[in-house]
Amino acid sequence: MSPFQQRIDQLTSAAVTQLNGSFSVARLGQVLQQFLVQAMQAAAQLLANQGHEKKQLVLDALGKALDAIPLPWWLALIRPPLKNLVLTIADGAIEAIYSQFKEQLAHE
């Protein structure tokens, strides 16, 4: 298993643990945003792939994390469209986060 995949597995376990027993939609959003940022950091540090490939690996990791997160029954019923919505939002968020990161580096 690659170091990137090991890190993603750790992040997924942490996300599941954080939501276990204390689920709310707001908390889900916080956990997913934290997962996304940390997965992007792991990709930047541990992968030699090009930007688009890294982005796709991060989106794939987020999708797998969403599959692992236990949802209450009322959200589990709509898991597939919810997952598609989250991944679509994350696709744009990755671009925004990366742009902010580049700007911060330029000003340092």
Image: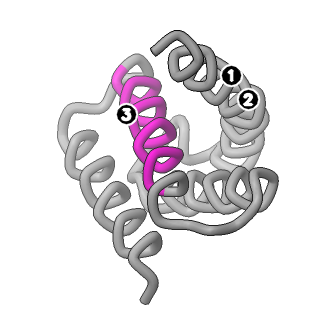
Badge nearest the viewer, 3 or 2: 2
Q: Is residue 30 magenta?
A: yes
The overriding secondary structure of the stretch rendered in magenta is helix
Mark 3 and 1 residues: CB-CB less than 8 Å, in contact? no
Image spot of residue 103 (x, y percent): 61, 15
Q: CA distance from mark 3 to mark 2?
A: 19 Å
Amino acid type, callout 3: Val
Magenta-colored span: 27-42
Residue identified by numbered label 3: 31
Q: CA distance from mark 3 to mark 1?
A: 21 Å
**Residue 99 vertical position relative to residue 71 in the rendered view, above or below:** above
| Residue depicted at 56% across the width and 24% down the height | 101
Q: Is residue 90 magenta?
A: no
Amino acid type, callout 1: Ser
Tell me the tag on residue 95: 2
- Secondary structure at badge 2 equals helix
The part of the image, by quadrant, that contains residue 94 is top right
Badge nearest the viewer, 2 or 1: 1
Tell me the tag on residue 99: 1
Crowding near pointer 1: few (<14 within 10 Å), some, many (20+)? few
Mark 2 and 1 residues: CB-CB less than 8 Å, in contact? yes
| Residue depicted at 53% across the width and 52% down the height | 44
Image spot of residue 15 (x, y percent): 32, 47
**Residue 75 vertical position relative to residue 13 in the rendered view, above or below:** above
Q: CA distance from mark 2 to mark 1?
A: 6 Å
Amino acid type, callout 2: Glu
